[in-house]
Amino acid sequence: MYKTDLREAVIRSIIDGALPFPVIWPNDTEKPPKNATWARGAITRLDGVGGSLGPGGKDKFNGSLEFKIFTEQKTTEAGAFNAMDQIGAVVKRGAALTASSGEAQIRITATGTRPGSNVDGWHLNTLRADFFAYVNGG
């Protein structure tokens, strides 16, 4: 596995463990639920910006996450916004999320939301979060 893939996997695992509903990432084999809230997540940018050397060295990355949040259309609009708020509570500006292994930490620097529309029986809303991450070098 390339180091970039590993770093992306670590960042995804931090997010997955913090949310109350499934997030389907690109190339996942998991299928979205048919009748429950879920999100499609993507790391839309992950740029290396430096690091430190030595045994305790860490690589720093700037990135952006995007979540498309799907709630059943029979859910009220308030319920759809509640699902977006649940992700927003995890990736709010200033939040620090750490991998259980201690291998990486993400710090959220900015967030934004975009109310969506109804698509194929689902409410669709979008949340974007910019972050920087420190990942153990190696």
Image (tube, rainbow, N blue to C red):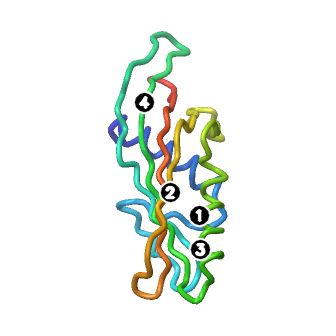
Query: Does the residue at mark 2 contact the one at mark 4 (Cβ under 8 Å)?
Result: no
Q: CA distance from mark 3 to mark 4?
A: 31 Å
Could you tell me residue 66's position as x and y percent? 44, 54
Residue 113's label in the rendered image is: 2
What's the amino acid at mark 4? Phe
Whether residue 7 is situated above or below residue 119 in the rendered picture? above
What residue sits 36% from the left and 28% below the top? 48
Q: Earlier in the sequence, mark 2 or mark 1?
A: 1
Q: Residue furthest top?
A: 54
Q: Which residue is mark 1?
A: 84
Tag 2 secondary structure: strand
Q: Which residue is mark 3?
A: 80
Q: Judge by depth and name the residue closer to the eye, 90 or 111.
A: 111
Q: Quadrant of the N terminus?
A: top left
What's the amino acid at mark 3? Ala
Q: Nearer the viewer, mark 2 or mark 4?
A: 2
Query: Does the residue at mark 1 contact the one at mark 3 (Cβ under 8 Å)?
Result: yes
Could you tell me residue 51's position as x and y percent? 43, 17
Query: Does the residue at mark 1 contact the one at mark 4 (Cβ under 8 Å)?
Result: no
Q: In the shown orientation, is residue 11 left or right of residue 83?
A: left
Q: Judge by depth and name the residue closer to the eye, 110 or 14.
A: 110
Could you tell me residue 28's position as x and y percent? 41, 64
Tag 4 secondary structure: strand
Q: Quadrant of residue 87?
A: bottom right
Tag 3 secondary structure: helix
Q: Which residue is mark 4?
A: 61
What's the amino acid at mark 2? Thr
